[in-house]
């Protein structure tokens, strides 16, 4: 499904970003695992596909770092066909009432979760134009569609991703670059456990019970939607936000 496509995945050292990389490789693509944290585990899990995987350091908040990632990708593979903007501040953010949130955390969430996507899109779009088109998949969150309380910094940053996705889709469409977003509900990862803390089991149970399909999401559920959007099977799909949430929010 992704044979011969070269796709950069940000935030790929662990969790759901790592799953995207492994599934891209399994689908025949080449992947760049990019993260502030070393992607050694992702490399080890690639197995026989490792020759199609490049691991790079990336700080999405730094435009120079994003540009260096794009340059290194072109040097290794000669093209860029896809970008999955997965890197985000989530697990480490402190929850609380909107007027009690830490201002520095608010600014950090906007810098990484919003500006970081802008930086990475700026870094790759010329290479995608040169390749004749491409697909950008931005990872937003059900929090933005549902309006998750007590984490307004996170919810607001992910709502901004939806607006950016729509604007970019219109700007880049004539270059055959598609831009879409995927909005998962809480995925059963270590990051989600850290975010909810001691109440994570109660939170995940409540989330599952509010869905039409009453089970918790796993990384493979989201990766299927992401890989489809990266593929030519979705070549006329752009500007969309696809909720992968078991039927919590139905637009």
Image (cartoon, rainbow, N blue to C red):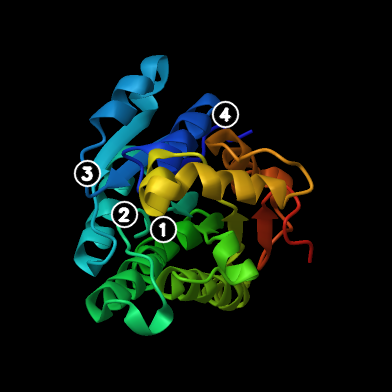
* Figure quadrant of the C terminus: bottom right
Q: For this view, does 91 lie left or right of residue 62?
A: right
Q: Where is 217 relative to 196, above or below?
A: above
Circles 3 and 1 in contact, beta carbons < 8 Å: no
Which residue in the structure is indicated by mark 3? 37
Question: How far apart in space, not on screen, are marks 3 and 2 (Cα)?
Answer: 18 Å
Q: Residue at image x 38%, y 69%? A: 122
Q: Which mark is residue 10?
A: none
Q: Secondary structure at mark 4?
A: loop
Cβ–Cβ below 8 Å for labels 4 and 3?
A: no
Circles 2 and 1: CB atoms closer than 8 Å: yes
Q: Judge the density around disc 3: few (<14), some (14-19), many (≥20) Cα neighbours within 10 Å.
A: some
Circle 4 residues within 10 Å: few <14, some 14–19, many ≥20: some
| Number of marks present in the image shown | 4
The residue singled out by tag 1 in the image is: 127
Q: Nearer the viewer, mark 3 or mark 1?
A: 3
CB atoms at circles 3 and 2 under 8 Å apart?
no
Disc on the earlier residue, 4 or 2: 4
Cα distance between the residues tagged 4 and 3: 25 Å
């Amino acid at each position: 499904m992704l044979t011969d496509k070269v796709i950069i995945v940000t935030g790929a050292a662990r969790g759901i970003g790592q799953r995207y990389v492994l599934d891209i490789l399994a689908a025949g693509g080449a992947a760049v695992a990019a993260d502030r944290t070393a992607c050694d585990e992702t490399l080890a899990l690639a197995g026989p596909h490792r020759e199609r995987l490049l691991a790079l350091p990336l700080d999405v908040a730094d435009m120079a770092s994003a540009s260096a990632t794009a340059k290194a990708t072109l040097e290794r593979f000669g093209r860029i066909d896809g970008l999955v903007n997965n890197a985000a501040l989530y697990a480490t953010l402190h929850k609380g009432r909107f007027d009690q949130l830490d201002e520095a955390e608010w600014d950090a969430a906007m810098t990484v979760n919003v500006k970081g996507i802008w930086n990475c899109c700026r870094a790759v779009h010329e290479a995608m134009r040169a390749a004749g088109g491409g697909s950008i998949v931005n990872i937003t969150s059900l929090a933005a569609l549902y309006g998750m309380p007590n984490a307004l910094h996170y919810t607001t940053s992910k709502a901004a991703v939806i607006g950016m996705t729509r604007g970019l889709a219109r700007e880049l469409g004539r270059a055959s670059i598609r831009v879409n977003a995927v909005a998962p509900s809480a995925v059963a990862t270590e990051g989600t456990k850290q975010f909810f803390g001691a109440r994570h089991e109660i939170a995940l149970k409540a989330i599952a019970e509010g869905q039409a399909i009453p089970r918790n999401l796993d990384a493979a559920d989201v990766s299927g939607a992401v890989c489809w959007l990266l593929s030519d099977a979705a070549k006329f799909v752009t500007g969309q936000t696809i909720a992968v949430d078991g039927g919590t929010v139905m637009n």
